[in-house]
């Protein structure tokens, strides 16, 4: 298997169908049967599973992994990473904020780097209206806090689109404990601790507020608290792996 793409999904009945169609339209012609799209159903109690099953009938590369209990976004991604079989692995959000062509850019970056992360540059937004002020403030504050407190020198560490080589994923998984929104930061800390190279890739993006499960204040507080765990209590490799 060449490529695995993971989508964590919690009650995404209204949004995930278009996302799956978009990814199938781009990746199926390029990868034939050498790719898989794993949807990790994370305690869903709506019709998300039916939508995924219907998409899988049209595109056999689309498969579901079902968990009856709610794992958290990070927990669902970790389950997807454990199940992925591709030489290159990516994960993206169910809302198609970062589309398949942009995800392909992240996967292409793995030709030179171990990990690639999306950078939702403001000038590359596809939205016609500005985001609410509170969201803009948070999008500026969290990267700044991560840079100052965690020494993570990235513009957009919380972007929901990331890719990594399979061997990098295998090396990072034992170090990852975060089950919620802070998994992105935990991955970047693990990559740094392991000496892995990380590329930032500017991506076009479209914020979709309708149907979003993010409660901004709660998620921001969760991430802030998690930074203290990552700073002082994270798992570290017992032996540094080559980058």
Image (spheres, grey):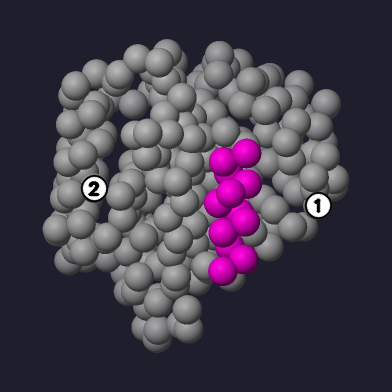
Q: Which residues are magenta?
A: 101-112
Q: Is residue 26 left or right of residue 96?
A: right
Q: Is residue 106 magenta?
A: yes
- Residue 82: name its quadrant: bottom right
Q: CA distance from mark 2 to mark 1?
A: 35 Å
Q: Quadrant of the N terminus?
A: bottom right
Q: Is residue 56 visible?
A: yes
Residue closer to the observer: 152 or 77: 152
Tell me, for residue 178, which label it has, or none. Answer: none
Residue 97 in percent (x, y) is at 49, 30
Label 1: few (<14), some (14–19) or many (≥20) C-alpha neighbours in 10 Å: some
Label 1 residue SS: loop
Where 196 sits versus 239, above or below? above
Q: Quadrant of residue 213?
A: top left
From the top left corner, tell me how far across and down residue 155 is, in percent.
30, 50
Residue 34 image point, x, y percent: 81, 52
Residue behind mark 2: 143
Q: Is residue 215 above or below residue 121?
A: above
- Residue shown at the point (39%, 39%) measured from the top left: 120
Q: In terms of secondary structure, where does tag 2 sit?
A: helix
Q: Is residue 8 magenta?
A: no
Return the residue at label 1: 34
Say few, some or many: other residues with alpha carbon within 10 Å of mark 2 (under 14 / 14 to 19 / 20 or more).
many
Task: State the residue in front, 63 or 18.
Answer: 18
Determine the residue positioned at 55% across, 19% down.
15
Count of numbered tags? 2
Q: Is residue 218 above or below residue 187?
A: above
């Amino acid at each position: 298997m060449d490529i695995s793409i993971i989508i964590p999904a919690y009650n995404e009945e209204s949004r995930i169908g278009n996302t799956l169609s978009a990814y199938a339209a781009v990746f199926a012609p390029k990868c034939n049967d050498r790719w898989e799209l794993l949807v990790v159903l994370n305690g869903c109690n709506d019709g998300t599973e039916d939508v995924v099953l219907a998409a899988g009938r049209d595109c056999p590369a689309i498969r579901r992994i079902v968990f009856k209990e709610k794992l958290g976004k990070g927990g669902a991604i970790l389950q997807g990473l454990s199940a992925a079989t591709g030489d290159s692995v990516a994960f993206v959000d169910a809302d198609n904020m970062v589309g398949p062509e942009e995800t392909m850019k992240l996967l292409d970056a793995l030709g030179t780097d171990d990990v690639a992360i999306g950078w939702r540059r403001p000038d590359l937004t596809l939205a016609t209206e500005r985001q609410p002020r509170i969201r803009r403030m948070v999008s500026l504050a969290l990267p700044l806090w991560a840079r100052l407190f965690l020494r993570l020198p990235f513009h957009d560490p919380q972007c929901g689109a990331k890719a990594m080589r399979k061997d990098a994923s295998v090396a990072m998984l034992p170090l990852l404990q975060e089950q919620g929104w802070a998994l992105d930061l935990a991955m970047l800390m693990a990559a740094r601790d392991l000496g892995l190279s990380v590329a930032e890739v500017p991506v076009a993006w479209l914020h979709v507020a309708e149907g979003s499960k993010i409660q901004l204040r709660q998620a921001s507080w969760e991430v802030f608290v998690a930074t203290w765990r990552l700073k002082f209590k994270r798992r570290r490799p017992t032996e540094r792996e080559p980058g």
